[in-house]
Amino acid sequence: MAAAVEQALSTREHLLVQAGTGTGKSLGYLVPALLSKDRVVVATATLALQHQLVERDIPALLDATEQTLGERPSYAVLKGRSNYACLHRVREGVPDDQGALLGAEQLPSGSLGAEVLALREWVEEEATGDGTGERDHAPRHGDRAWRQVSVSHRECLGASKCPFGTECFAEAAKERAYAAQLVVTNHSLLAIDAVEGIPMIPEYDAVVVDEAHELVARVTQAATDELSVPEIERASRRAGRHVEGDEAEDLADAGEVLREAIDETPPGRVDRLPPQLGDALVLVRDAARALASAMPRDTGEDAGAAQAKGWAQELFATAERMAAGADADVLWVAERDRNRGGNHLCVAPLQVWGPMRDKLLYDKTVVMTSATLKLGGDFDSVASSVGLRVDERSSDDAPIERDASHLPWRGLDVGSPFDYAKQGILYVAKHLPPPGRDGLGAAQLDEIAELVDAADGRTLGLFSSRRAAEAAAEGVRERLPHLTTLAQGEAQLAELSALFVEDPHTCLFGTLSLWQGLDVPGDTCQLVLIDRIPFPRPDDPLMSARQRAVEQAGGNGFMTVAANHAALLLAQGAGRLIRTTSDRGVVAVLDPRLVTARYGAYLRASLPPMWTTTDPAVVRQALGRLAAG
């Protein structure tokens, strides 16, 4: 892998590397990145991997190689502005009411006010002690408390206007990144910088995208905008203090018109703008533009004015995008409870491969790596989704020259240190009925209980919905009361994971965040249950629009969109089982379509090469032997 990454950086060929868990893939790209002498950006999808790189892998690598290299290359971490504490917010912003009225000794432990006061004290310690002010290093707190000591990019005064600009944590992080050879950031910041064209990262020559199976989703997320009536109302109230005319009230009135239009529009994808909704969006757009124009041109050091103007400008841009009804965008009405603001509008790009090709792959050298990049047995699907054409794939026998119309790339599978055929069993419950819309039936619940009983706990259940996870947990508790059964939502995920690890006679049932984010090697997890093939919901606005677009272009929309989505999640879910060379266990899929449907072979080819069976007796015996030690 290291040799392939080195070749990619020198020849400017893009590289897709599938590297299984335990291969040490971070060293596989860090070593050639440091040897290249160019600035390389490493983008991750999760904070856990970012921590691993910054706290463990990179320092260990530099310690080991400093003498050989003759120098110690520099590295830096760069995150979005809201991940850093804001000194202006802490020292001059409006304080939290509790924190303003009470002293720390009077506040109940764990209250919002106590959290805010603790954060403020920590911020000042960071400022006087050359700390980074990063949220990850802060005392324990919730999202509401953190908002009291941080700002978003639209609220920021800017380093030149802020009285604390020379001390700013976010600006200091930028400066460190400008001086570093290696910059560690996240997919979202990379997307904003490269695809959205908003400068966030210092000029760089190449980028390594780790956890690259997440990239398309993260780029899509970064390019998605929302518009809600409560947001319009807040912007109107904030701006009303800074304008003399009726512009703020006009925006609030436009918000009410939009509320009526949204209420009249059925939830789901909006293929053609209804006249009432289109007119309301134009009204909001024009009112937001008028409000932004009425604000002072230079807000100076007035953080409130800067924030209000930024909100108005953002509302204008979002409403304008939605009102345009461009073919390149997908617009939909998303459902939300009235007490959380009611239904709201969302808009996302129909596809991101075009912008990624034009704005990232064309200018930079990109290495993408993950444990799951081969879907259906090859790299073609993932390559196409990020903007690389299948006919551009290069090889030693037929290298392709990079030019304006060709972006050569290679695919490499470096394998795995695990012997999946001996360590794992893939069991498909062929005898069960296909899953229905009503969730888990009696047959599925019986099957789950029998498998969990055979495993004596030690089960991670990955379910397609919260309702299914809760139903399975309730069913197992009734049938197997001697085991501990945990369900996502009953406590914080970190606490549930700790409880799961502590006692092997435990089951943990949950949904999507467990499919990809949980790492529990050893005897804790010897059975991974998957209730159904994780196809996207048929009424998912973005996925259904993408599927239709593929079909209109003459392709197979189901295989290109739905099957690839399911294959990726299945591979990630199955990957929870084998985390070390000594792990053993079973991945049990309760959806018979994995072996009975025509697309089943494609999905199975995306999974680790485990020994496969449809015999429940064989699997129960295997689980029993594992549980007995």
Image (cartoon, helix red, strand yellow):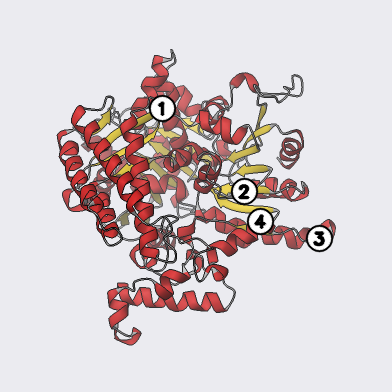
Q: How dense is the environment of label 2, judged by Cα within 10 Å: few (below 14), some, or many (20 and up)?
A: many
Of residue 17 and residue 576, the one placed in the foreground of this image is: 17
Secondary structure, mark 3, is loop
Residue 274 coordinates in the image, percent (x, y): 21, 27
Residue 30 coordinates in the image, percent (x, y): 69, 49
Q: CA distance from mark 1 to mark 4?
A: 35 Å
Residue 535 coordinates in the image, percent (x, y): 36, 31
In the displayed structure, does residue 246 sit left or right of residue 396?
left
Q: CA distance from mark 1 to mark 2?
A: 29 Å
Pointer 1 or 4: first along the chain: 4
Pointer 3 or 2: first along the chain: 2
Which residue position holds label 4?
A: 178
Q: Going by the picture, which residue comes out furthest to the front?
A: 245
Residue type, numbered disc 3: Glu
Q: Is residue 512 above or below residue 238?
A: above
- Which label sits in the foreground, 4 or 2? 4
Q: Is residue 202 above or below residue 445?
A: below
Q: Is residue 496 visible?
A: no
Secondary structure, mark 1, is loop
